[in-house]
Amino acid sequence: MKAPWSATARQRRQAGQGSWWSGLPGVVYLIALVFLPLVIIFVYSFLSRAKLGVGVKWQFSLTPYTELLFSESLSGGRSFDPTYLQIIANSFWYAIITSVVCLVLSIPIALWLATRAPERRTALVFAVTIPFWTSLLIRTYSFIIILNDNGPINGLLKGIGIIDEPIAMLYTPFATVVGLVYTFLPFMILPIYASAERFDFRLAEAAYDLGAAKWTVLRRIVLPSIRPGIIAGMVLVFIPALGSYLAPELLGGGKTSMIANVIAAQFGASRNWPFGAALSVLLLVITLLVLVIFAVVAKRASRAAGRGGWEALI
Amino acid sequence: MTMDSMPTRGRKRRRNGGVGPGLRDFPTFKAVSYLVFVFLYLPLVVVVAYSFNSNRVVSVWRGFTFSWYSEVLGNDDIQRALFNSLRIGVVATIVSVVLATGLAIGLLTMARAGRTFAWTLIGAPLIIPEIVFAIGTLALFVQSRIPLGVNAITLAHIAFCVPFALLPIRARLRGVDPAVYEAAADLGAGEFTIFRRMTLPLLAPGIVAGALLAFIISLDDFIVSYFLAGPGGTTLPVYIFGMIRNAVTPGVNALSTLMLVASILIVSLSYLLARKRR
């Protein structure tokens, strides 16, 4: 990915600005600990399973990739097995639902934030970012308390007499989606807000004065103007949602495995590192493809993603 | 908010400050916004509230108690995990801030291709799914016979702390008028003197802000630490995961509350520093 926020760097060497080699240790470090791990994963995905399961056997093999589609019986026969295709499809499905729910929740709050007085706005945007900086593990765990049969939601509903029996919410796909939406909501709100903040709301007022109904103003004037933010938000939510581990692991109760959970299992209990590596390569390829697709949909998306997403957090 | 967006605030004030009828009174927007805020903070509130629950069964409220805090603080395993987390966090923060400061300065004068390459490396940990990064690092360490544990976790944390440390430093650096360096150079200061006496003090708030962010990111990381922990490298989040997985006692809420408070304090401090005017 081409990083967007490098655009304004001064190219001309100026007195006292230091020189490019001061960045060298950082670059070397990142090559060793970001690039090399990816290379190793790629190599591992073409090797054989080690006898005891930890590590790999250095023997070329395409089995890790065929295992994605076929299961091998003890007698050596191969049969089509849709288990992993199903999990990949599930992951897409969860990521899509998460993106859409986040979008629907984020447009109102982003526009609401953008129309507050500037002093309050800054504080409110900071309030949106605070949960992001707290432990994701703890926030996800908290939904175990919130959604469980004796938790506050069921307690409240029972208390006011709407239900007699608790609604089973924890360890269902619903719980996983709630956890995913919760995890990624700020990544949708912030870029849309960044777009909305740049929008000249006098345009909306003008349309309003000319007799347009509120929903028409929203649909025809405001939404097209914040489109870059929406696209950036979709990228920033969809991609990490696809690779989520914690929400399905803790809230799905084993019923909602996503790709990341299967990868983790291969490096844990299932002890099949090459297969885990092949799944990782697949996840990376999908991630890159999705990035490219979004970039084609809107060239400005990555720019807005950088500005509105990561930099807005800080 | 970024540092860069600040100079334009005056303009925006005129533009959006007194928004008229149009959108402001979209009836559902305000309600949805309030609900979103409730949703965002509910998990934090619930964990804190239930940390005072005297019932052994985590999810059923019975009465108020402080006892989980003393139980958690007196637990040897938790103290060891805390010590591991702090040690990893401090070392990862120091190294990543040094690397990020070098990168921030170096990026200004790098050739275009080098810059693109550097930014791809810096941004990669934010785009790559964390599980892939975790198992990739695990494979790298196993392959190169680096033992798992506290040091392995530290090495991995440095890599994904760099982008978080970099952004505030870079925002600060971009706000510095290059004329001040030229003035210093004209007055006879050498490169190193300029770095020590001008660049560093000018960047200091950004460096501290970046360090605080890097520290939280390291402190709160679970997935990477979980895969690299080995037998002796249990950090606080890894310990908490074990508590959630095995026997959930309300102690997990007390421990979580302490971590939440620490994160929120640190990020608020970082935010105030990054916003400080020159």
Image: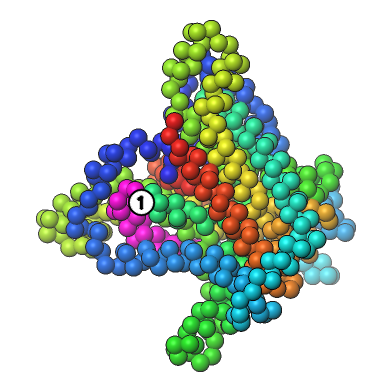
In percent of the image, x 74 and y 46: which residue is there? B87
Neighbour tally class for label 1: few under 14, some 14-19, many 20 plus, Cα within 10 Å = some
In percent of the image, x 48 and y 47: which residue is there? A313
Dot 1: chain letter: A
> Is residue A72 rendered to the left or right of residue B101?
right
Q: Position of residue A7 (x, y in %)?
A: 45, 31
Q: Is residue B44 above or below residue B162?
A: below
Determine if residue B205 is in view: yes
Instruction: Quadrant for the C terminus of chain B, please.
Output: top left
Q: Residue furthest left?
A: A210
Is disc 1 placed on a helix, strand or loop?
A: helix
Q: Residue furthest right?
A: A51
In percent of the image, x 30 and y 68: which residue is there? B28
Instruction: Quadrant for the N terminus of chain B, please.
Output: top left
Q: Please, what is the three-letter code of the amino acid marked with disc 1?
A: Arg
Pick whichever, B132 or A144, lies toward us.
Answer: A144
Q: In which quarter of the image is residue A82?
A: bottom right
Q: In this view, does B100 lie above or below A192?
A: above
User: What secondary structure characterizes most of the magenta part?
Assistant: helix
Q: Does the magenta stretch include residue A106?
A: yes
In percent of the image, x 37 and y 63: which residue is there? B33
Give the magenta range: A94-121
Q: Where is residue A140 in the image (x, y as percent from the top left)?
A: 59, 65
Pick whichever, A84 or B72, lies toward us.
Answer: B72
Determine if residue A179 is in view: no
Q: Where is residue B53 in the image (x, y as percent from the top left)?
A: 62, 75
> Is residue A19 rendered to the left or right of residue B239?
left
Q: Mark 1 points at which residue?
A: A121
Pick whichever, B180 or A255, lies toward us.
Answer: B180
Q: Position of residue A212 (x, y in %)?
A: 15, 60
